[in-house]
Amino acid sequence: MPLQNFQYDTIMREYSRRQNENRHILEEHQKEAYSKFPRLKEIEEEVASLSARKVRALLSGNETGTDDLRTAIAGLALERRAILTEHGYAPDYLELPYTCPICQDTGYVGSKKCACFKKAEIELLYTQSNLAEILKKENFDHFSFDYYSDTIKNEATGLSARETARRAYDIARNFVRDFDNSFENLFLYGDTGVGKTFLSHCVAHELLKSARCVLYFSAFDLFDLLAGTTFSKKDSHTEEDLIYDCDLLIIDDLGTELTNSFVSSQLFLCINERIMRRKSTIISTNLKLENFSETYSERTFSRIASNYQMVKLIGKDIRIQKIFLGGK
């Protein structure tokens, strides 16, 4: 998904800030160097005068003598360099510094985004995802099957908790791998603490690394945000504008919020709108499937059942297991 206008503007404002900051650094360098070595100021003025003469000659079509001007400018540059280095300054001390010398702090190399722009894009998306810190620990590299039992069985499938977790892990991996080629949604369900949220974070981490726009909300925060925007008259470009259009929306702990007719209708609207736009969603819930329709509606559950891959996790509460293991 291309950056929203306000996201693009946020990044470009940072480039503008860098340019202003670096111009200020150059001005400070010039002020110091010219006060100590007046000859440097004279060289700068001579170079400016010769450069202007060269430009006028080229514009008038008279290139006679431009080689001499070029030679004179090069000689003055060497003299400036010698003065600086003899007194312990870097040879480029009086040149405009760049945070990124590749794009010279414009964000672009030709018509293509510079690597620094792509890095800024990813960092911005991480920040806006609400997951920046937690994904340092919760990702595929840190997913462990050690917390899943070989003896606890899923009666419906006959698979152990560990086998079930491996299946869910593979589904999540494939979801990331095929993200650009197929439209998929995941519905993660199971008891508290069996790794549903962790698995959704794994997916988010991989997609954010490749500059996809991912938004994470607990169910409570999502519906609180939607309520605020529904009942206010403000028209602003903030996170709520991305709910329907971000590449991946994660709704965590669905069923823990205070459910009412507003929440039920907003959930259907959100799910339906994102399906219509073919934007992927991951929902995690502790609710049993047979209770989901009662909590929300048959209509909502029907949309989920027909458009989401249902992924169940079973086992003992991993958070409690970690407490007994001393936080490991």
Image: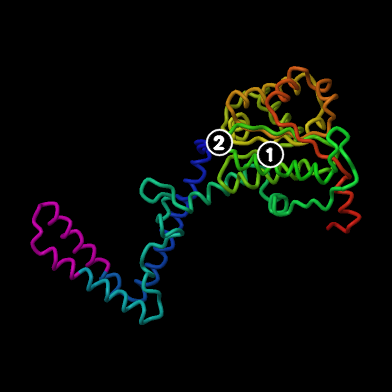
Please tell me whether mark 1 sits on a helix, a strand or a loop. strand
Quarter of the image that includes the C terminus: bottom right
Q: Is residue 279 left or right of residue 268?
A: left
- Position of residue 201 measured from the top left corner of the image (x, y, whole percent): 70, 44
Q: Residue at (62%, 40%) from the top-left corner?
A: 214
Q: Residues within 10 Å of mark 1 (few under 14, many from 20)?
A: many
Give the distance between the C-alpha atoms of the residues marked 2 and 1, in whole angstroms.
Answer: 22 Å
Q: Residue at (75%, 51%) from the top-left corner?
A: 143
- Position of residue 234 measured from the top left corner of the image (x, y, whole percent): 60, 26
Question: In the rendered structure, which amino acid carries the disc numbered 1?
Answer: Tyr
Q: Quadrant of residue 242?
A: top right
Query: How many numbered marks, from 0 up?
Result: 2
Q: Residue at (91%, 55%) from the top-left corner?
A: 324
For this rendering, which residue is in front, 219 or 153?
153
Q: Residues within 10 Å of mark 2 (few under 14, many from 20)?
A: few
**Pointer 2 residue:** 181
- Position of residue 186 measured from the top left corner of the image (x, y, whole percent): 70, 34
**Pointer 1 residue:** 216
Residue 54 part of the magenta-drawn span: yes
Farthest-out residue, bottom = 86
Q: Give the dominant element type of the magenta stretch: helix, strand or loop.
A: helix
Magenta-drawn segment: 44-72
Please tell me whether mark 2 sits on a helix, a strand or a loop. loop
Whether 157 is drawn above or below 65: the answer is above
